[in-house]
Image (cartoon, rainbow, N blue to C red):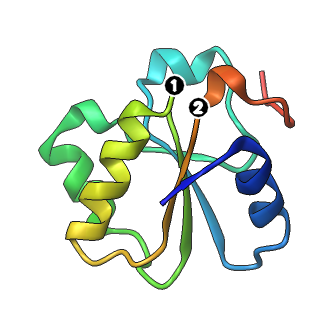
């Protein structure tokens, strides 16, 4: 499900069962990330799927990439393997105005 930056941030702030998933490359993550995020690079292919298998499907996933494209794909993949709540950050990290870890 796509959420605007405001919706995503607001939902995340009020969610005690939240898990933030960053699907960018490690190089992108080094340039900064949203606090508390776990990184699993979607470009790893099978490695990305293997990483997903280790996650708790009962959590609510807040997924982002640089622009919102890869995270949209990631949410679709997650839904197909049994994750019921995966929220895509529209506009991605490049438009994020919340807190950032540098």
Q: Is residue 26 above or below residue 77?
A: above
- Judging depth in this view, the residue of 63 and 68 nearest the camera is 68
Residue at 29% x, 56% y: name it.
Answer: 76
Specify whether 17 is left or right of 49.
right
Q: Position of residue 67 (x, y in %)?
A: 51, 25
Image quadrant assignment for residue 44: top left
Specify whether 43 is left or right of 85.
left
Q: Residues within 10 Å of mark 1 (few under 14, many from 20)?
A: some
Q: Are marks 2 and 1 in contact (CB under 8 Å)?
A: yes
- The quarter of the rendered structure image containing the C terminus is top right
Check disc 2 and report the residue beneath it: 92
User: Which numbered tag is attached to residue 67?
Assistant: 1
Q: Earlier in the sequence, mark 2 or mark 1?
A: 1
Specify whether 15 is left or right of 42.
right
Mark 2 residue element: loop
Q: Is residue 44 above or below residue 55?
A: above
Residue at 70% x, 24% y: name it.
Answer: 95
Real-space CA distance between mark 2 and mark 1, rounded to the nearest whole angstrom: 4 Å
């Amino acid at each position: 499900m796509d959420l605007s930056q405001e919706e995503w941030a607001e939902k995340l702030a009020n969610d005690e069962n939240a898990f933030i998933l960053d699907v960018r490359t490690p190089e992108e993550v080094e340039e900064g990330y949203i606090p508390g995020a776990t990184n699993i690079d979607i470009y790893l292919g099978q490695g990305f799927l293997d990483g997903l298998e280790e996650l708790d499907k009962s959590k609510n996933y807040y997924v982002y990439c640089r622009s919102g494209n890869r995270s949209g794909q990631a949410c679709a993949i997650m839904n197909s393997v049994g994750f019921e709540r995966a929220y895509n950050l529209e506009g991605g990290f490049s438009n994020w105005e919340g807190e950032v870890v540098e």
